[in-house]
Amino acid sequence: MMFQIWLHAVLLFCGLFSNVTGAFVGVNIGTAVTNMPSAPDIVAMLRAHQITHVRLFDADAHMLNALANTGIEVMVSVTNQEVLGIGELPSTAAAWVTKNIAAYVPSTNITAIAVGSEVLTTLPHAAPILVPAMSNLHKALVASNLNYQVKVSTPNSMDVISRSFPPSAATFNASLNSTITQILQFLRSTKSFYMLNAYPYYEYVKSNGIFPLDYALFKPLSPVKQIVDPNTLFHYNSMFDALIDATYNSIADLNFSGIPIVVTETGWPSFGGSIEPDATSANAELYVNNLIRRVSNDSGPPSQPAVPINTYIYELFNEDKRAGPISERNWGLLFTNGTSVYSLALGNSEITGANSSSSFCIARPGADDKSLQDGLSWACGNGQANCAAIQKGQPCFNPDTLQNHASYAYNDYYQKMRGSGGTCDFGGTATITTVDPSKFFLISLEAYCYHPDYFIYQVMKLVRVHLCRVSCWVRK
Ligand SMILES: *[C@@H]1O[C@H](CO)[C@@H](O)[C@H](O)[C@H]1NC(C)=O
Ligand SMILES: *[C@@H]1O[C@H](CO)[C@@H](O)[C@H](O)[C@H]1NC(C)=O
Ligand SMILES: *[C@@H]1O[C@H](CO)[C@@H](O)[C@H](O)[C@H]1NC(C)=O
Ligand SMILES: *[C@@H]1O[C@H](CO)[C@@H](O)[C@H](O)[C@H]1NC(C)=O
Ligand SMILES: *[C@@H]1O[C@H](CO)[C@@H](O)[C@H](O)[C@H]1NC(C)=O
Ligand SMILES: *[C@@H]1O[C@H](CO)[C@@H](O)[C@H](O)[C@H]1NC(C)=O
Ligand SMILES: *[C@@H]1O[C@H](CO)[C@@H](O)[C@H](O)[C@H]1NC(C)=O
């Protein structure tokens, strides 16, 4: 385990200038809505709110047509009713792919198929057919040469995990071991991802006051209330992170690694009945906006700090036709007339990562040394970048590489000069990134400091060097 962490830390540091793409926040679109807007109207609302990723609970032709040529990425779903037929007959899977995927790509950017919804916990008798269904769909995609573009997975609820706290001790419910092992084998061999429906709202309500509401809502916790995993000493700032780590640990417990988690559903109801006092518009607004901020910072949960947490909010509209408690009909972000139910940070560019205040100019990976040296000399000379911090003995000298020094100088120049027309070019050796370079250092230092392991010493050496580097990139 520690070896893994150590390796991880090393990879993390080496990844400093690798091309990590930013995390996204998408939205689920449920359709149990009276007066559902037309597909083109829905797409207009998505664009108005700069939503770049959506998940559909089916493969509705109107929506798939309306989403064509919008740049919006689409996850479609096989309904629970369809899983059985697709699992039983490869030809049914092939017909499904032809009708619902091949007919729309590439104009509509379908990137994933969610096979069923929480099948293992809501339709346990269908569990044996789930992996065959995924596998049949994958084979049909291979036959259409779409398997690189379209990934197949299946959303699971947190209920497949028997005890989610502390995250380090979480395991899948043993009765699901064999099915989940097959799912993980499938995801690994097809380079797909684990789909997780993670609802701090339900976990908080179930916990009967064990966890503070602030923890579920991503609000800062006072030091006495901080949630620490006793085994790893990771500090959990939010229940959202803890649920994801519980899932990563359950996956690791079955000896799988390298399968990223995508949160296919999370959210907070804005209204509820008298026995649902936490379903309020104020809480929903806090949860959703803090979630967007959390995901957009691109860091992963404590156990996987370099793996961004791509997330789909549940959901676009209040589904007034759903049964169940009042809260069930109040998860929406928007009314059907397009106005938001509460104030939303979705419209601002945080969600797309395009906000210029969070872009960095760094040396392009792979740029040749000679050109980098020219760029660096120019930036620190005529460009008037402040290059003091990258001189020998200064805090941003390490790592002592041309890539690092040029990145620092380029960024300093760019941040100062872009207002007056300065560009991020440097003879083609520079590139803009919205990934905060300091994010690579956001690891729980305490966890390493206290771990009585041999590797700690090595890790600490790296951490010290790199910790200083955080300050090199903190926004000015
Ligand atoms: C579709 O989405 C993928 C994944 O982000 C992206 O690489 C690709 O360029 C997109 N394709 C189109 C046609 O927009
Ligand atoms: C595990 O799953 C079984 C069968 O679905 C269920 O009866 C049991 O309560 C679950 N155990 C835990 C600890 O969640
Ligand atoms: C399920 O996996 C866990 C962890 O590897 C193991 O302890 C347990 O015995 C397994 N249960 C079954 C029924 O295979
Ligand atoms: C995982 O690997 C360990 C060490 O090789 C082994 O002892 C354990 O039984 C494995 N667990 C499973 C669920 O395969
Ligand atoms: C990003 O989120 C993580 C997890 O909540 C947090 O530890 C970290 O401080 C955040 N980083 C920034 C730059 O806000
Ligand atoms: C949109 O619908 C909501 C809920 O029905 C209503 O409260 C709001 O006033 C409407 N907004 C506009 C601009 O019509
Ligand atoms: C970027 O975000 C900041 C803070 O949210 C905001 O003040 C600023 O106006 C935004 N800039 C642009 C170009 O959108």
Image (tube, helix red, strand yellow):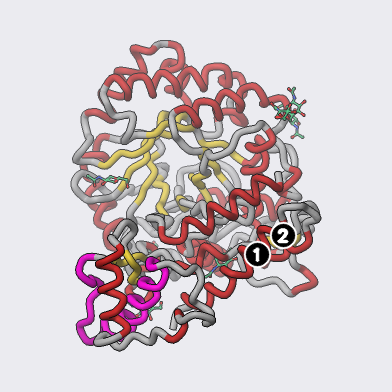
The residue at 49%/80% (across/down) is 392
Q: Residue at x 81, y 55 (%)?
A: 452
Instruction: Measuring from the top left, give residue 300's x and y in whole percent.
Output: 55, 55
Q: Quadrant of residue 341?
A: bottom left
Q: Nearer the viewer, residue 16 or 393?
A: 393
Q: Inspect the magenta stretch and tell me whether residue 404 lies in it.
A: yes
Q: Is residue 323 above or below residue 302?
A: above
Front residue of this view, candidates 265 and 183: 183
Q: Is residue 39 visible?
A: yes
Query: Do the residues under discs 2 and 1 have CB atoms within 8 angstroms?
Result: yes
Residue at the spot 80% in from the left edge and 72% down from the top edge: 224
Residue 126 rendering spot, x and y as whole percentages: 56, 20
- Magenta span has 16? no
Count of all numbered marks drawn on residues in the image? 2
Q: Please state if 155 lies on the left or on the right of 209 as rendered.
A: left
Tag 1: residue type?
Lys
Which residue is pictured at 38% across the width and 13% down the height?
A: 90
- Say above or below: 80 vs 242: above
The three-letter code of the residue at mark 2 reads Tyr
Q: Nearer the viewer, residue 454 or 110?
A: 454
Task: Assign the magenta stretch its main secondary structure.
Answer: helix
> Where is residue 2 shown, x and y percent of the image?
71, 48
Q: Which mark is residue 442?
A: none
Query: Callout 2 environment at 10 Å: few (<14), some (14 to 19), or many (20+)?
Result: some
Residue 116 locus on image (x, y percent)? 48, 30
Query: Mark number for residue 457?
Result: 2
Query: Disc number at residue 461?
Result: 1
Mark 2 near ligand 5 (CB under 8 Å)?
A: no
Q: Secondary structure at mark 1?
A: helix
Q: Which residues are magenta?
A: 402-428
